[in-house]
Amino acid sequence: MSAVLAERSVRPQGGTTPSIAVVLLGTGVVGGALLKLLNTSAAGSLRLVGVANSRWQQTDSVRLSQRNLREHLNQHGDPRDNASLLAALDASGSAVKVIIDASASAALAAHHPEWLARGYHVVTANKALAGGDLVGWRALQAALAHGAHYGDSATVGAGLPVLSTLRRLRVCGDALLTLEGVFSGSLSWLFNQYDGSRPFSALLREARQLGYTEPDPRSDLSGEDVARKLLIIGRHAGFSISSEEVVVESLVPEALRGIGSEAFLARLEELDAPLAVRHTEAASRGNVLRFLARLNQRGHARVGLVEVAATHPAARLYGTDNQFALSTTRYNTQPLVIQGPGAGPEVTAQALLGDVLALKA
Ligand SMILES: NC(=O)c1ccc[n+]([C@@H]2O[C@H](COP(=O)([O-])OP(=O)(O)OC[C@H]3O[C@@H](n4cnc5c(N)ncnc54)[C@H](OP(=O)(O)O)[C@@H]3O)[C@@H](O)[C@H]2O)c1
């Protein structure tokens, strides 16, 4: 069979009831890639009944089937209103109604428990709820008791099978003992490249140009995104960790934290000296620097720059690879290691689609 997926339209098919109706929130890098996937045969009988960005939304079936949906949204969309998106799901007649959150909005994530409790399935790349404060995590667990599903594969490792593996292990009575790894594609790339031959700021500029970092790279360098992923995995493993309990080492110097984005980008060279010192010290011992997330058996969680031996698994990563090393009661002599590209719009969008299609089964 051809690996090329046939193009199809997400246009409603003659008023038939779709087996899965979806609303997509967020049409940025990931949401845009998902819209492309929805136009392939992989999307099956899934039907898009609403799309929204932060300001505009669309539920008109003809406009939803237009090619430049993202651009049209800004020109012809209606003002944002979650209630009419939910009404579009209800009007679809489908038994499986799904809200896909491809934003990073904490305000939107705060609605996930309410939507689940009302019977809508939620599939998300947004980490703000499960990786936010413990109150939100607990509200999520309570809402899941109502029976709707929460597709969260895209929140960690851009769809690498980390959370699904952890769930399988736990169902079999296994338990996570320790967790260690590189959870950020951008920080992985930066430290895989950083060998002292080029200043860190030059690598950071290149990573930004390649689209590996957020527009403001402090979102990556602060370690907060890695901390959210550590919280999500740790909580899935049964550790009740609050955000405040994760020790986070930011790579952004104090003086560069409160300034505007443009000012920060103009002062990237200020990152160089402190990192060069740490690199030189590590290299003198034959070691390398890696930005690691760690959770130990007592639930102590830390995110930050660590010196590791050249033989350490994290020292042998490539590109934007993520790595998750799970030691469990049954994987205790050698950890179970999951590794691969942990960022990128196509794989993340695929993780979202995979979670949606799993609802059909
Ligand atoms: N990029 C990756 O490789 C990757 C990998 C794994 C996970 N993720 C996660 O995926 C999510 C999206 O990432 P991205 O790179 O696509 O971000 P992005 O390009 O900044 O897109 C975010 C989108 O969310 C929209 N949005 C914000 N608030 C909203 C609201 N209240 N209602 C509806 N839409 C809203 C934005 O609207 P406007 O267009 O109006 O601003 C934008 O379209 C994030 O949580 C990110 O952490 C990304």
Image: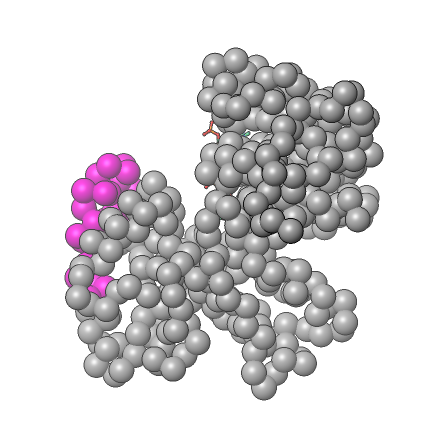
| Chief secondary structure of the magenta portion | helix
Which residue does the image show at 23% across and 69% down from the upper left? Answer: 195
Which residue does the image show at 49% across and 63% down from the upper left? Answer: 340
Q: Is residue 82 visible?
A: no
Image side of residue 191 versus residue 153, left or right: left
Above or below, 258 relative to 282: above
State the image coordinates of residue 27 (x, y, percent, origin top left): 51, 32
Image side of residue 323 versus residue 118, left or right: left
Tally the numbered discs.
0
Above or below, 162 relative to 308: above
Q: How is the rendered protein coloured?
A: one colour
Residue 204 included in the magenta stretch of the image: no
Which residue is at the front of the view, 157 or 216? 157
Q: Is residue 280 visible?
A: yes
Q: Which quarter of the picture shows residue 329?
A: bottom right
State the image coordinates of residue 62 (x, y, percent, origin top left): 63, 16
Residue stretch in magenta:
254-276
Above or below, 142 relative to 73: below
Q: Which quarter of the picture shows residue 360?
A: top right
Residue 262 included in the magenta stretch of the image: yes
State the image coordinates of residue 16 (x, y, percent, origin top left): 80, 25
- The extreme front residue here reads 1
State the image coordinates of residue 52 (x, y, percent, origin top left): 56, 26
Which residue does the image show at 77% across and 31% down from the upper left? Answer: 18
Which residue does the image show at 63% across and 32% down from the upper left? Answer: 8
